[in-house]
Image (cartoon, helix red, strand yellow):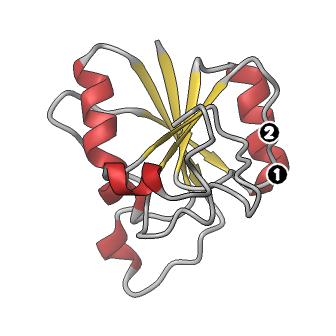
Amino acid sequence: MRLAFVIERQNYYRLLGPVIDRALARGWEVDCWQAADEALKGSPALERRDAGPVYRHGRPRRRDYRGGSNLAQHLASSSPDALAALRPPPGVRPDGRTRWLALQYTLDIGALVDAKGHTPFDAIGLHTAHWRARRRLATYPGL
């Protein structure tokens, strides 16, 4: 299994870390596609942008991207089995070759599902059953 994570901000490593580590533990190939154009805040030395995190079960491959068109090129050239993100990736649309997985990030899922209950994702990982029970999600079969 080949899995790619879209890392739009440095703190996404903290949020997605347990999922990334679990994928590495299963022996899956894991890529982290990190936005290279994220503005640095505070001391750049503290962010350790170049190193990337190390997990208990290894280190994922890291590729930088600059904007949505470059992210689309990564997707087209590497064709992972699944793409995991905390919100719809910028400049990329589902093409049917790669399954899209969203992971709930905040207490609202408004970035993942529109007002009509539609989503570009094939599946959404939610924190609790409460979120699935919400009326606008109850009819979505991917949850």
Q: Residue at x 55, y 46 (%)?
A: 138
In the current view of this chain or complex, which residue is farthest to the left? 56
Disc 1 to disc 2: CB gap under 8 Å: yes
Q: Residue at x 38, y 32 (%)?
A: 60
Element at badge 1?
loop
- Relative placement, left or right, of 132 versus 142 is left
- Relative placement, left or right, of 44 versus 118 is left
Task: Looking at the picture, tell me which residue is in the foreground, 99 or 28.
Answer: 99
Q: Residue at x 62, y 40 (%)?
A: 140
How many neighbours does mark 2 have within 10 angstroms: few (below 14), some (14-19), or many (20 or more)? some
- Relative placement, left or right, of 114 versus 17 is right
Residue 20 at x, y = what percent?
A: 33, 36
Q: Residue at x 40, y 87 (%)?
A: 42
The circle on residue 72 is: 2
Q: Is residue 5 above or below residue 135?
A: above
Task: For residue 1, say whether it is visible.
Answer: yes
Which residue corresponds to mark 1? 91
Residue 101 at x, y = what percent?
A: 55, 36
Q: Amino acid at mark 2?
A: Ala
Element at badge 2?
helix
